[in-house]
Image: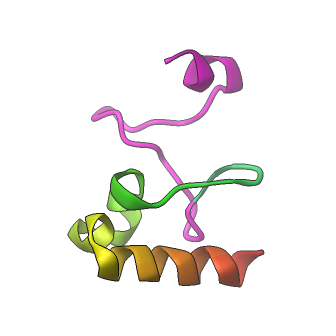
Amino acid sequence: MPLIQDEKLKCAECGYPIVTETLEWAPNLYVAGALAELEIGLISRNISGARQAAKMIANSV
């Protein structure tokens, strides 16, 4: 993907982004949903995961 290459964003071998504990992929670029799966786990794709991601992101900004 051009954005990943242009911004040199870190990805795992499986293609998922490597993010911080606060779901930050790059400065001021946060992920949720499927992209947060490596940090949050399988719930990242449902409402519970969305709530958890929102809390994590909100607490970090």
Q: Is residue 11 magenta?
A: yes
Q: Is residue 14 above or below residue 19?
A: above
Give the dominant element type of the magenta stretch: helix, strand or loop.
loop
Identify the image's colour scheme: rainbow, by chain, secondary structure or one colour. Answer: rainbow
Q: Is residue 52 left or right of residue 8?
A: left
Q: Residue at left 32%, top 32%?
A: 13
Q: Is residue 52 left or right of residue 25?
A: left
- Total count of labels: 0
Q: Quadrant of residue 24?
A: bottom right
Q: Position of residue 55 (x, y in %)?
A: 56, 84
Which of the image's four quarters has the C terminus? bottom right
Report the front residue among 5 and 52. 52
Q: Quadrant of residue 38?
A: bottom left
Q: Position of residue 21 (x, y in %)?
A: 55, 69
Report the front residue among 29 and 10. 29
Q: Position of residue 23 (x, y in %)?
A: 55, 63
Q: Position of residue 44 (x, y in %)?
A: 32, 68
Q: Residue at left 60%, top 70%?
A: 22
Q: Residue furthest left?
A: 42
Magenta region: 1-23
Q: Is residue 22 above or below residue 12?
A: below
Q: Residue at left 41%, top 73%?
A: 50
Q: Is residue 35 above or below residue 21?
A: above
Q: Is residue 3 magenta?
A: yes
Q: Residue furthest front?
A: 47
